[in-house]
Image (cartoon, helix red, strand yellow):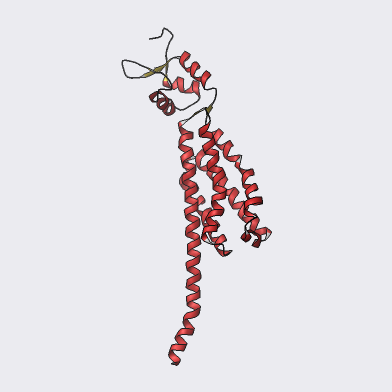
Amino acid sequence: MPEEPLISISEASQMLGVSEVTLRQWTDEGKIKAFITPGGHRRYSRAELKKFLGSHPKVLGIKDLVAKLEETAQQHREIARASLKNALWYHKLNAEAQEHLAELGRRLLSLIIKYITEPSKREEVVQLIRDIGHEHGEMLAKLELPLTDSVEAFLLHRSPILNATTQLMKRREILTGRVVEAISLVAQVLDEALVALVAAHQQHAVRLREEEWKEETPGDISDALAL
């Protein structure tokens, strides 16, 4: 037992700039040494904590993840200029429609950031994310873009966001527990948007078939009566 006074888990977490839950996790994983009191409480050595901070000069938090996600905005613009503009269907869009698609993409990114930074509003935000996916799917269906191409267009914008989270995980710095959770949430909400896109596209196709059937049916009945 070291001679220096030991500090509580609350003081230690404040010193490291992480939550107590994260510190407990790091302790259980053997990243930080803790001393257990006879009463079962964890105590930490300031020297050990300083040593940890010295070997891990930066602990990545939610702000770092948000910064990484915000950096993808430029990549989305490049995708619109390059990949999408090479697609034949993209040239069918007028300037207003192109801007509308771009705006949907910006709103989606903004909502993803809000989803991971405001846990209390997640239920409300995930519905807004589904609404954007639905709007994407319906718009692309009205442009007569096949479902496979619609999904491909969405995945082109999905990749930079997921890549940003992957790059953060590959860095040598320690990630807080909240960031690890948020990274998995990013993939989940993107999937929610994609499912909504596919559903909206399919619903539009069903409505078109029903309208075509209604237009054809009266004539068929009249012909049958004439016979």
Tell me if residue 127 can be seen. no
Residue under the point 65% across and 62% down: 92
Residue 128: % across, % down:
51, 51
Residue 109: % across, % down:
57, 45
Query: Looking at the figure, which quarter contains the C terminus?
Result: bottom left
Give left or right: position of 225 versus 167. Answer: left
Residue under the point 46% across and 45% down: 188
Image position of 93 with respect to 104: above or below? below
Image position of 111 with respect to 25: above or below? below
Query: Looking at the figure, which quarter contains the N terminus?
Result: top left
Residue under the point 48% across and 22% down: 14
Give left or right: position of 173 versus 20. Answer: right
Spot the residue most to the left: 38
Total of numbered circles in the picture? Answer: 0
Residue under the point 50% across and 65% down: 204
Image position of 209 with respect to 152: above or below? below
Residue 21: % across, % down:
42, 28
In this rendered view, identify the residue nearer to me: 30 or 200: 30
Spot the residue most to the right: 95
Image position of 199 with respect to 216: above or below? above
Residue 102: % across, % down:
62, 52
Spot the residue most to the top: 3
Tell me if residue 140 can be seen. yes
